[in-house]
Structures are given as structure tokens and as C-alpha cells.
Amino acid sequence: TAAMTLGRLSRTGPTRLTVLASDGGVSQPSMTQLVQRLEKQGLVRRVRCPDDGRAVLVSITDAGRDVVRERREARAE
């Protein structure tokens, strides 16, 4: 889900799309669609992996970190 993906990126930093998909238990096309939605919302950004130009790294933006922080605070209440 979006919340789990944002939380993981917040904890681990930039992560390959394929790793996000396998760790999330979803197909790569499903994760690609999710990341595209999050990117349109300004919560993540995609960049080419410097070690492998074919691979894509996904990283959380400041806006994405704000969403994660707000969700954590809401759960703590």
C-alpha cells in the first residue's frame, strides 16, 4: 500500500522499484502504478540508479516525509 511504501522509503532511503515490489508482495507493474500515483502527488521521486542506468530508484520527498510524520502522530494519539 501507499502508506507502507512511504514508511519503508522513510526508514531505508532510496530503494529500487523491484525491491519495493518484492518486499511489498506485489508485482512490479503494480508497484510501478503505485509509485506513479505517489509521484504525481509529490510524495516520491524516481531517479535512475547511478550504478545501473536501467534500474530506477524511488526516494521519498519532504512532502512524503510530512505525510509519514502526520500518520505516526495520528496513530500515537
Image (cartoon, rainbow, N blue to C red):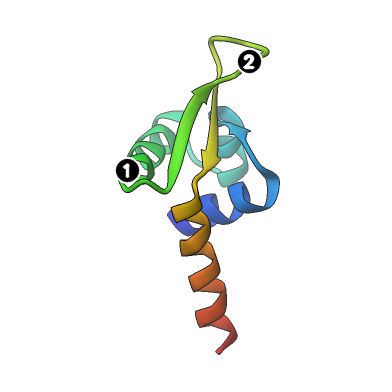
Question: How far is the residue under mark 2 from the one under mark 1?
Answer: 24 Å
**In this figure, which residue is indicated by the disc labeled 2?**
50
User: Could you tell me the amino acid type at mark 1?
Assistant: Arg
Q: Residues within 10 Å of mark 1 (few under 14, many from 20)?
A: some
- At 37% from the left and 40% from the top, the residue drawn is 39
- At 55% from the left and 39% from the top, the residue drawn is 59
* Secondary structure type for disc 1: helix
Q: Residues within 10 Å of mark 2 (few under 14, many from 20)?
A: few
Residue 1 falls in image quadrant: bottom left
Q: Position of residue 65 (x, y in %)?
A: 53, 57
Residue 4 or 69: which is nearer the viewer? 69
Residue 64 or 25: which is nearer the viewer? 64
Seen from this angle, which residue lies furthest bottom? Answer: 77
- At 35% from the left and 36% from the top, the residue drawn is 36
Q: Position of residue 37 (x, y in %)?
A: 32, 43
Q: Residue 1: in sight, yes or no? A: no
User: Could you tell me the amino acid type at mark 2?
Assistant: Pro
**In this figure, which residue is indicated by the disc labeled 1?**
37
- Residue 58 marker: none
Q: Residue 68: in sight, yes or no? A: yes
Judge whether 73 appears above or below 31 on screen.
below
- At 69% from the left and 45% from the top, the residue drawn is 12
Q: Is residue 32 left or right of residue 75?
A: left
Q: Is residue 44 left or right of residue 51?
A: left
Seen from this angle, which residue lies furthest front? Answer: 62
Residue 75 falls in image quadrant: bottom right
